[in-house]
Amino acid sequence: MQKQTLLKHWKDQSLFQEKYLEAFKKVKREEFILKNYKNEAYEDIPLPIGFNQTISQPSTIMIMLQALEPETSNKILEIGTGSGYNAALLSILSPKGKIFTTEIIPELAEFAKLNLKEYKNVTVLNIDGSKGYKEESPFNRIIFTCAIPKIENFILEQLKDPGILIAPVGDKISQEMIKITKKDLQIKKDNLGNFIFVPLKGKYGF
Ligand code: SAH
C-alpha cells in the first residue's frame, strides 16, 4: 500500500482529525523500519524492528495519539521508544513541547537516537521506563507503547493535573487500551477497546 492510499482510507472513514493526518503525512515511517521491510512501510500492520520487538500498526498508533490529545507545548513521557517512530509523531504534534522517551534495550535506544536526529525536542533515554521518569515529572501526557500489567500509583503521580495517560493494560496475550484523564484531582477511566502489544519488561513489567 502507498502512504496516500492509507491516508485516503482514513479520510474516507473520518477516523482521525486533520492534525493527526498531517503529522502522519510528515513523518517517514520507512525511515524507522528495517531495510527488508521498506516495501511494507505503509501496510497497516506492525513490523519487526529486531530484538523481538515491533513498530506498532499505523492505525493503532493513530488511535492512541488522538486519544492522548497532545497540545502544542506539552511535556510528554513515552515508555517504549522502539524505532522512535511514535516519538517523532509526538514531536510534530507538540512542536514547542518536550518529549522524553524511554527504551530498555540499549541497541534499540541507539537505533531510535539515529532515527530521531532531526527531531530536536525528543530525548531518548536508555532506562527502565516501567518506573516512569520521576526526574522530569510531572508530565502533561504519558503514553505506554507496550503492554502493562497495571497502572501503578506512582505513574499516576507523575501525571500532571490536568493530564492524560494512555496504556494497553492486561496480560501478555491481549490488553484493553485504557485512557486515564486526570482533572481537578479526579481520575476518569475509559476503555478504548482490545489490542495486542509486546510486553513491558523491567521492574514493574511482566
Ligand atoms: N513506540 C515504538 C514501538 C514500541 S514496541 C515505535 O514507535 O517503534 C515496545 C518497546 O518497549 C520495545 O522496544 C521494548 O524494548 C520497549 N520496552 C519494554 N519494556 C520497557 C521498559 N521497562 N522500559 C522502556 N522500554 C521498554
Image: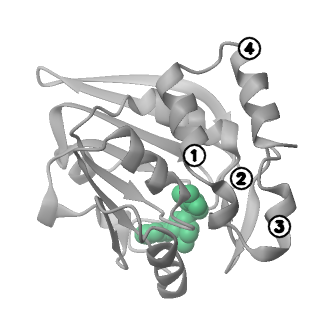
Query: Mark 4 belongs to which amino acid?
Result: Gln
Secondary structure of residue under mark 3: helix
Q: Residues within 10 Å of mark 1 (few under 14, many from 20)?
A: many
Q: Residues within 10 Å of mark 3 (few under 14, many from 20)?
A: few
Seen from the viewer's position, the closer of residues 168 and 71 is: 71
Q: Residue at x 51, y 30 (%)?
A: 20
Q: Which residue is mark 2?
A: 173
Q: Residue at x 39, y 39 (%)?
A: 93
Q: Residue at x 56, y 50 (%)?
A: 27
Residue 109, x across and y down, in percent: 46, 78
Seen from the viewer's position, the closer of residues 11 and 4 is: 4
Q: Is residue 69 left or right of residue 109?
A: left
Query: Mark 3 belongs to which amino acid?
Result: Tyr
Between label 3 and label 1, give the one nearer the viewer: 3
Instruction: Name the N-terminal-most of marks 4 and 2.
Output: 4
How far is disc 3 from disc 1 in space, using C-alphas?
29 Å
Q: Which residue is mark 3?
A: 37
Q: Which residue is mark 4?
A: 13
The image shows residue 53, relative to residue 193, as above or below, that is below
Q: Are marks 3 and 4 in contact (CB under 8 Å)?
A: no
Q: Are marks 2 and 3 in contact (CB under 8 Å)?
A: no
Q: Quadrant of residue 121?
A: bottom left
Q: Which residue is mark 1?
A: 170
Q: Is residue 206 visible?
A: no
How far is disc 4 from disc 2 in space, using C-alphas?
29 Å
Secondary structure of residue under mark 1: strand
Q: Residue at x 26, y 51 (%)?
A: 155
Residue 147, x across and y down, in percent: 56, 53
Query: Mark 1 belongs to which amino acid?
Result: Gly
Secondary structure of residue under mark 2: loop
Q: Quadrant of residue 99?
A: bottom left
